[in-house]
Image (cartoon, rainbow, N blue to C red):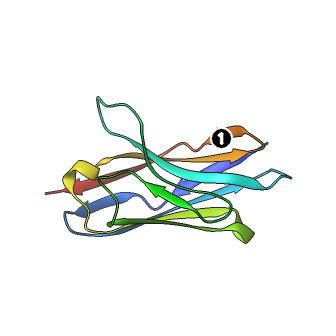
């Protein structure tokens, strides 16, 4: 059974930084893409950043230049380095991994940015 576990959320002041981690386990197959999504209160879940098995990345416009996604294939882990955080980045951040065309989600980690 595939498990996806996020960590690293918390409370930070505007302008600060946080690093999120997400580890996937329990699969005998290689992970395709890994990505971070977020959902703020009253809003739909949105893509933040995604990285393919080959290392190609894509970012939501509002985070490009501030956030960096990376992955360690040996550890089946994806990271999200978040800098210059803004109050509007406040949300629950979810990790999603795709393995053999099936998607698996983590439980989410809260990120709160105070002004």
Q: Position of residue 86 (x, y in %)?
A: 21, 58
Q: Position of residue 62 (x, y in %)?
A: 29, 53
The one nearer the camera, 13 or 99, is: 99
The one nearer the camera, 63 or 36, is: 63
Instruction: Pick out the residue farthest to the left.
Output: 115
Image-based side of 89 in relation to 49, left or right? left
Image-based side of 25 in relation to 48, left or right? right
Counting other residues with Cα less than 10 Å from the Cα at mark 1, is it few (<14), some (14-19), or many (20 or more)?
A: some
Residue at x 37% of width, y 31% of height: 44
Residue at x 83% of width, y 52% of height: 29
Find residue 84 and report its image quarter: bottom left
The one nearer the camera, 44 or 65, is: 65
Q: Position of residue 58 (x, y in %)?
A: 48, 56
39 vs 14: above or below: above
Q: Quadrant of the C terminus?
A: bottom left
1 vs 43: above or below: below
Q: How many marks?
A: 1
Q: Secondary structure at mark 1?
A: strand
49 vs 100: above or below: below
User: Which residue is identified by label 1?
Assistant: 104
Image-based side of 5 in relation to 62, left or right? right
Residue at x 60% of width, y 53% of height: 34
Find residue 71 and report its image quarter: bottom right
Q: Quadrant of the N terminus?
A: top right
Q: Position of residue 47 (x, y in %)?
A: 44, 44
């Amino acid at each position: 059974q595939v498990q996806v576990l996020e960590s690293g959320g918390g409370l930070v002041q505007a302008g600060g930084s946080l690093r999120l981690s997400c580890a996937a386990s329990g699969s005998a197959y290689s992970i395709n893409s890994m990505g971070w999504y977020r959902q703020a209160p009253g809003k739909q879940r949105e893509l933040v950043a995604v990285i393919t098995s080959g290392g190609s990345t894509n970012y939501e416009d509002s985070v490009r230049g501030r956030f960096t996604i990376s992955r360690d294939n040996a550890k089946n882990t994806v990271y999200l380095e978040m800098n210059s955080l803004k109050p509007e980045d406040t949300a629950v951040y979810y990790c999603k991994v795709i393995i053999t065309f099936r998607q698996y989600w983590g439980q989410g980690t809260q990120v709160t940015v105070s002004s």
